[in-house]
């Protein structure tokens, strides 16, 4: 059963609703892992049971969850759909799920498994006509489109190929299709915990203030999150910094003064 997508939980384009913390669960062989700069050779297993991890996030009061089927992304087909089903049955969170989404039946299966949103990356660049068909079939609210960026240029195919378009034009194309929920990963920052690409996000939002922009990559502490909120981002996907306890879960319950910024 598809869970309803509440757009209010996505934050607002202006950033005046606060910023939504979106923890990431990346899955390889059914386990919760993290990669560094997308390199499968640089992976660290954080938990054998992703469902347990999701319960910890839900218990901390977090409302959103970003799940990536890394096996699926590598294989070009869904692999860990059962993990999604188990997580969705265990927690009441707004889940986006992606990795290996190639066919309309993949979208159907992901939504039926309990995700609220389907995450799309390279396909949105390479086959915009397919994305447009899916948007018409399911509605834009059920999609989260990712832009993987290096030096303001969009990368595809596991970050290995230049898509031949800059991120600003790409976002403009998505807006023309009715997409407003977009996340952007600065490849140079991913997994490095050296700070997010705040200037890039500011530049995107200056040109396209109407979108819900979710930042991804580089977050190492709570001040990074505050900077992203002040830059206008509606959400931030955090992986390694949470797992390494650099952004601890307990304060996310609202016990820290800094978290007054967050929705």
Image (cartoon, rainbow, N blue to C red):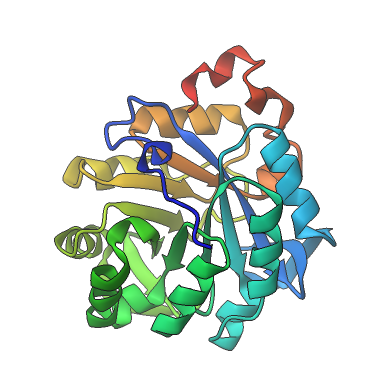
Using the image as rendered, state which of residue 130 and residue 71 is in the foreground.
130
Q: Is residue 108 visible?
A: yes
Using the image as rendered, state which of residue 42 and residue 178 is in the foreground.
178
Q: Is residue 37 visible?
A: no
Q: Is residue 112 left or right of residue 122?
A: right
* x, y percent for residue 145: 37, 62
Kindly give the residue lying farthest to the left in the view shown: 176
* x, y percent for residue 223: 55, 27
Residue 220 falls in image quadrant: top right
Kindly give the residue lying farthest to the right in the view shown: 48
Seen in the picture, residue 201 relative to 25 is either above or below; the reply is above
Q: Residue at x 28, y 72 (%)?
A: 137
* x, y percent for residue 61: 64, 32
Residue 168 falls in image quadrant: bottom left
Using the image as rendered, state which of residue 200 and residue 119 is in the foreground.
119
Q: Residue at x 35, y 54 (%)?
A: 182
Using the image as rendered, state which of residue 219 and residue 178 is in the foreground.
178
Q: Is residue 232 left or right of residue 251?
A: left
Q: Residue at x 23, y 74 (%)?
A: 132
């Amino acid at each position: 059963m598809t869970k309803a997508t509440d757009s209010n939980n996505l934050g607002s384009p202006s950033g005046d609703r606060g910023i939504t913390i979106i923890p990431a669960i990346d899955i390889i062989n059914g386990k919760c892992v993290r990669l560094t700069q997308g390199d499968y050779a640089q992976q660290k297993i954080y938990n054998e049971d992703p469902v347990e991890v999701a319960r910890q996030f839900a218990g901390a009061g977090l409302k959103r969850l970003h799940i990536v089927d890394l096996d699926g992304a590598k294989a070009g087909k869904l692999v860990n759909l059962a993990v999604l089903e188990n997580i969705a049955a265990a927690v009441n969170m707004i889940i986006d799920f992606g990795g290996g989404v190639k066919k309309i039946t993949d979208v159907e299966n992901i939504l039926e498994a309990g995700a609220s949103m389907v995450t799309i990356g390279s396909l949105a660049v390479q086959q915009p006509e397919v994305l447009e068909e899916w948007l018409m079939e399911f509605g834009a609210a059920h999609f989260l489109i990712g832009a993987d960026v290096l030096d303001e240029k969009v990368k595809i195919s596991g970050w290995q190929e230049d898509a031949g378009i800059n991120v600003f034009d790409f976002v403009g194309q998505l807006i023309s299709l009715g997409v407003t929920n977009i996340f952007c990963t600065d490849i140079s920052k991913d997994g490095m915990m050296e700070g997010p690409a705040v200037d890039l996000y500011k530049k995107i939002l200056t040109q396209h203030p109407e979108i819900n922009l979710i930042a991804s990559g580089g977050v190492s502490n709570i001040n990074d999150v505050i900077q992203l909120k002040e830059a206008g981002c509606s959400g931030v996907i955090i992986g390694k910094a949470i797992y390494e306890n650099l952004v601890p879960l307990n304060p996310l319950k609202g016990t820290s003064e800094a978290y007054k910024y967050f929705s």
